[in-house]
Amino acid sequence: MSRLRLAFWGTPEIALPCLRAAAAEHQVVLCLTQPDRPAGRGRKLKRQPVAALADELGIEVAQPAKADQALERLAELEPQALVVLAYGQLLSPAVLAAAPLGAINIHFSLLPQLRGAAPINWAILRGHERTGVSSMFMAQGLDTGDVIYQKACPIGAQETAGSLAQRLAEMGAQVLLPTLEALATGHAPRQPQDQAAATWAPMLSKSDGLMDWSQSAAELDRRVRGLDPWPGAHTTLGGNPLKLFAPTMLLDDNQGQAPGTVLAAPQAPEMLAVACGQGALALGSVQAAGKQRMEAAAFLRGAGAAPGERLGA
C-alpha cells in the first residue's frame, strides 16, 4: 500500500478506530479537533478524545476555534488528503481544497439515507433494519458527495445508539483503509448519490427524549433505544424527572390501563412495565433525579413506581 500524508479531522470517541487505522498504515501529519472543554463537576478542562489519542501516537494536534485558522499549518505540512469524521464544524471550500487528493468523509449511514448529524440515532428511531458506513468525497452540500465505498450491517432488536455506535466505529476503520488505498492508487470509485432518495438525520436535543405514552410500545421502544445513552428518553414520576434506558421488552397487553400507567407484568417482573397507547413497554434501567443510572429492579425495590401510578401525568 502506498503511504499517504494525511490530516485527520475528528473530535469524539467514535473517530478513534479510524485514527488508529490511518496512523498504522499511513503518515498522519496533523490531527485537528474541537477545542478542549470543561467537563464534570469540577469543570476541569478535558482533552478531546481524538486529541488525547493523537498525543499518545505522537501526532501534532491543532484545535482552532474556526477550521480556516488551520489553513496556514496545512500549507506547511502539505498533506495529500484529508480524512474527516465527526469533526463538529462544516469545512469551507478553502479547507476542502487544502490537499491535492481531496477530502474524504466517513459517515455512519448508507448514503443517501440519513444525511446529517445523528444518523446512528435516527436509524433506530425510524425502525431501519440495517444501516452501515459510507466513505465519500466531500462536497459543499451536507453529506452530498460522491460515494466511494459502503459496508452494511443489520440493526439488532435490542440495539441501542451506544452499542450501534461502537460497532459502526470499528466498521468505519474497515471502510477507511480500502478507501485510502484506492485514493493512493488513483482508482477510487465515484458513485453520485441519488438526491431524490436522500433522507435526513437532524441533530438531537434533550426535548426529543420526551415520552408520549399514547404512542405504541414499538414506537416508544425505538425512542428509548435510539436515544440511549444520549440525550436519553425521559418522563416524569410524581412531578420529578425520570430517564429511561434499555434493555427493553415489548408486551402485547396494556391491561386496559391508561397510557403511562405502571403495570404489574408477570412476563417482566424485574423491569418497569408501562402501558402505552398500543401494548406496553418494559424498561430494564432508569435514572431518577439526582441518582445514578440503575437497574429497574433496584429502582422498584426502593422508592420506585408502584402498579397503578402514572408516568408523565
Image (cartoon, rainbow, N blue to C red):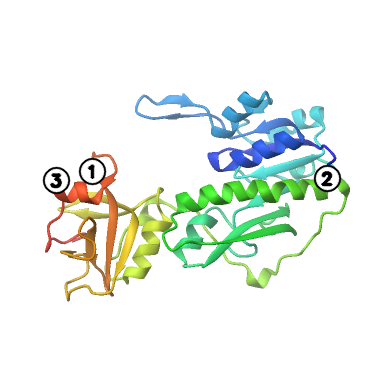
Query: Relative to residue 80, is residue 280 depicted above or below?
Result: below
Image quadrant in which the N terminus is located: top right
Q: Amino acid at mark 2?
A: Leu
- Labels 1 and 3: the sequence-earlier one: 1
The quadrant of the image that shows the C terminus is: bottom left
Judge the density around disc 1: few (<14), some (14-19), many (≥20) Cα neighbours within 10 Å: few
Query: Pointer 3: what residue?
Result: 302
Mark nearest the camera among 1 and 3 is 3
User: Does dot 3 land on a helix, a strand or a loop?
Assistant: loop
Cα distance between the residues tagged 1 and 2: 51 Å
Q: Residues within 10 Å of mark 2 (few under 14, many from 20)?
A: some
Q: Nearer the viewer, residue 228 or 311?
A: 228
Under tag 2, what secondary structure?
loop
Residue visible at 85% across and 42% down? 100
Q: CA distance from mark 2 to mark 3?
A: 60 Å
Left/right placement of residue 3 relative to residue 177 reads: right
Amino acid under disc 1: Ala
| Residue 302, x across and y down, in percent | 14, 45
Q: Mark number for residue 289?
A: 1
- Against 1, residue 107 (above or below) is below
What's the residue at 16%, 72% (across, down)?
Answer: 257
Q: For the point 51% across and 62% down, which residue is it?
A: 155
Residue 212: which disc? none
Secondary structure of the residue carrying tag 1 is: loop
Residue 154 visible: yes
Viewer-nearest residue: 88 or 190: 190
Q: Amino acid at mark 3?
A: Gly
Q: Which mark is residue 101?
A: 2
Residue 105 seen in the current view: no
Residue 40 lies, in percent from the top left, at 38, 30
Say if mark 1 contacts mark 3, CB within 8 Å.
no
Quadrant in the picture for residue 39:
top left
